[in-house]
Amino acid sequence: MANLALLGGEKTVTLDYEKVGNLPIVGAKAKAAVNEVMDRDEISLSPIVQEFEKKFCKYVGAEYGICLSNGTSCLQAALFGCGVGPGDEVIVPSYTFWASAAPIVATNAVPVFCEVNPDTHCIDPVDVEKRITKKTKAIMCVHVWGNPCDMDAIMAIAKKYDLKVVEDCSHAHGAMYKGKKVGTIGDVGCFSLQGSKILVAGEGGILVTNNREYYERATALGSYERLGSLPDDSNYKQYALTGMGHKFRPHPLGIAIANAQLDELDERNAVRNGNAKYFEELIADIDFIKIQDTYENCEKMYSYHYARYDHEKFGGIRLVTLLKALAAEGVTCGLCGYGRLHQAPLFTKGDVFGKGCPVKCPYADENRTSEGLELPVTEYLADASFMLAPRFEQPCKELIEQFSAAYHKVAANLDELKAYEVEHEEELKNYKPKSGRSINIFR
Ligand SMILES: Cc1ncc(COP(=O)(O)O)c(C=O)c1O
């Protein structure tokens, strides 16, 4: 009789994650807040948006903030805000969601993909510096999986070459870098508030900065209704009638949800982080799992729980086999879709506007698509990183212990896995995650 549930053995996880580990996305306070806004008939414009902006700015320690329709529009507005335009190059990791990079081309600028550190999964400053040309204008850092980047190194490079820094904080609401909240270290910080994040509006985003010019310019791009109230000496007040061609206004009902949730963010982050760290402690003896390293004096928010699988430490077993075995034991886990952006047609072709732009824009230096670009570390991490566990949203010690027991059971049954691989060779070798997606839950 086999031990592993994958081969007919008994399943380890008997508790239901949805019942004991998860929580409804929209709780009672958020529902009440939405109803209040609806009772006031404020379904398009509402002061709840400005209320949230002020509260969020206070929370992160930024002077200016504007809510937009999503994190993607925040990133586009941030790039435009700090002056990125036609032909400019922006260095961005490939190990991220597409929205860290695609807004660069939407700005008619050129994304230049760089490597990440295989232990922290964050942008590699040494590799960034190697990719700087006279066209480089900005660096896009992503605090991936809630883990703060090496911002001292990035800011030193930015200073040396006079570059702007945009922080994509979509996974990192509340994460700390040396005593400061992420999003306030570079020139502009952007937070997605999409429904899978740790602070949600359903769809929505918020951009923060301490620079008045960047704020006003970012506002001008897609928030015409806000331009009339800019100070009289603003260069952007003149665009109050038209904005600059986009409409990035967020839905106030969504922002009402985020506004209510912000009051509980620290408390909920503490529970999530405590649970995730407990889980990491329990599986620390499993040497084929490499937990994401955190830079010194940083606090990661466990918005997602990803790790790296070192298959050579587990008899060469494929990641997909490991995940199948874990899933059969009842663990919620998944493959990773990050790390292949440099191979996506949007960036290998670089012809977004049909006339060769942005890469053949007259302002661009050379035809710099990502066609044929090799990023060995990123590609390795794309294959090796995986979702270790879901977000444990409430205290659930017993469930976490069951997950740990499942990992230990799988680790102790290498021979059964080897036999399974021999039998299912064809199926396993053709398995592919959905590229570009952060979550590919394994079933
Ligand atoms: C790293 C990262 N950046 C940007 C975004 C884009 O945010 P949104 O979906 O709100 O447009 C996401 C959303 O998943 C993300 O994970």
Image: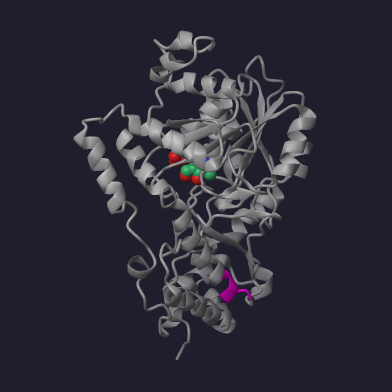
Q: How many numbered markers are drawn?
A: 0
Coloration mode: one colour
Q: Residue at x 77, y 24 (%)?
A: 134
- Residue 15 drawn above or below residue 91: below
Q: Could you tell me if residue 312 is visible in this image?
A: yes
Which of the 4 image quadrants contains residue 35?
Answer: top left
Above or below — where is 157 with respect to 107? below
Q: Is residue 29 left or right of residue 13?
A: left
Q: Is residue 340 above or below residue 352?
A: below
Q: Where's residue 160, x and y in %? A: 80, 31
Which of the 4 image quadrants contains residue 332? bottom left
- Magenta region, residue range: 280-284
- Residue at the image point whose x is 59% and y is 30% from the top: 210
Most foreground residue, 429 or 206: 206
Please report the residue visible at 58 percent of the width from the left and 20 percent of the height from the top: 213
**In the image, 296: left or right of 238?**
right
Where is the N terminus found, in terms of image quarters? bottom left
Q: Residue at x 59, y 62 (%)?
A: 307
Question: How far from the left and from the top, in percent, is residue 230?
Answer: 47, 16
- The dominant secondary structure in magenta is helix
Vertical placement of residue 427 versus 166, above or below: below
Q: Nearer the viewer, residue 116 or 368?
A: 116
Residue 131 visible in this rendered orientation of the protein: no
Q: Quadrant of residue 114?
A: top right
The x, y position of residue 125, in whole percent, is: 74, 43
Asked if the magenta segment contains residue 264, the reply would be no
- Residue extending furthest bottom? 1
Residue 303 in the image, given as x and y percentages of width and height: 50, 54
Left or right: where does residue 342 sit relative to residue 431?
right
